[in-house]
Image: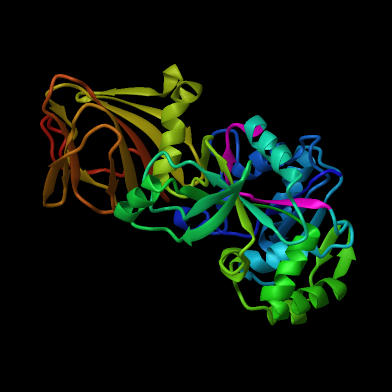
Amino acid sequence: MKIRPVILCGGEGTRLRLKSKKNLAKQFIDFGGWTLFQKTLERVKNPLFDYPIISTNFSYLNSVRKYLSKYKINKYKIILEPFKKNTAAAILSSALLDEVPFEQPMIFFPADHLIEKNNQFNRAINLNKKHLDEENIFIFGIKPNSPSSQYGYFLTKKISKGLNKVVKFIEKPDENNAKKIIKKKGYWNSGILFARKISIINNFSKYQTKTLNLCIDAIYKSKVSKNIYYLNKKSFKKIKEKSYDYAILEKSKNINGIKLNIPWSDLGSWKEISNIFIKNKSKYLKKNNVFYRPWGKYINLFYGKGFLVKELVVNSKSSISLQKHKHRSEYWTITSGKPKITINKRKFFKNINETVFIPQGAIHRIENLFKKPVKIMEIQIGVILKETDIIRYKDVYGRVN
């Protein structure tokens, strides 16, 4: 039996909100010819999977339809939630559809995750499919490459060959605690779930009976038109907003971890997006986007909707002007050299791979006191992303406003 993919596409990606596009969710942001929702659709087109179910809301319906048409996915079901109730209700309502047989394995993909080695990921799915039963749930864990405080973690205990039982979930620890968790061989909680339909229902029956009954009512009373389930508003409104982690995973004693060592990200921060452009800079580099200045040069790599990615190169013994911007903030990642940074009254040095955030309106400067050129990947975020939005206070090249 093929695996039923469910794409959870109702979130807003609030950590990455763009001022210029209030309703542009993270999964639909163009990052240079691709979006996270596009990547998710490409993933579920694999022969391993049955046709997809997409759980979303009215705000995103047109975008979802556009991508389904663009990537020629003609067979699908869409569940439209009248209210945002977090992942517990979204997962359960998808599992309750009559089109899904009780014994069918289901995998739940957040629409805003980037998985770069899909073949390795799919092999892990196939290896663990045989272990699915009427009670257990599998969650995919990613081996951490840093002590990030952006993700939750879990710890496991090996119970048999190929099976690792989750013994503890840790919700977004600070960096020091994240280091301790990694030493205990903790994995990032990716939020990608794998279970049979019957297991999803059985766990809600055991731990969240009221949510189960209300979801059944919302599905039963829903209006169905052209592959879309319009969930009943009256029933769905009564459901308490809960994450699946809180509603089920933290209560069940039958959770197993699938541990992977692959590139993965939910692109939930500008640092992660910056790393994508650092890694793939050559794909965006064009000669006509290089602009020379007395202090060095900058290269415009990609204009997004509400953000601009560029690389700054500050020559030895050079500095940009002491300046501020009225309409944008900036996020810097140091890729070469050791710049001296000024932000308002603070002055400090930064090393390679370290980051700096420049709030909108903050007075700032980059100085290179050493021989090696300073290179910085800069992401500008705001409503106006033009060179005219610079107010200079001091400049060694005489360009004060």
Quadrant of the rendering where the C terminus is positioned: top left
Which range of residues does the magenta coloring cover? 104-118
Is 116 located above or below residue 193 in the figure? above
Is 326 located above or below residue 295 in the figure? below
Check residue 111 for magenta coloring: yes
Residue 30 vs residue 220: left or right? left
Check residue 302 for magenta coloring: no
* Residue appearing at x 67%, y 56% in the figure: 137
Residue 161 % position (x, y):
63, 41
* Residue appearing at x 62%, y 58% in the figure: 255
Task: Tell me if I can see residue 20 in this picture.
Answer: no
Residue 61 % position (x, y):
72, 57
* Residue appearing at x 71%, y 74% in the figure: 206
The quadrant where residue 45 appears: top right
Residue that lies at the very extreme toward the front in this rendered image? 160
* Residue appearing at x 63%, y 69% in the figure: 84
What is the count of numbered marks? Answer: 0
Residue 159 % position (x, y):
59, 50
Residue 76 % position (x, y):
83, 50
Quadrant of the rendering where the N terminus is positioned: top right
Residue 279 vs residue 58: left or right? left
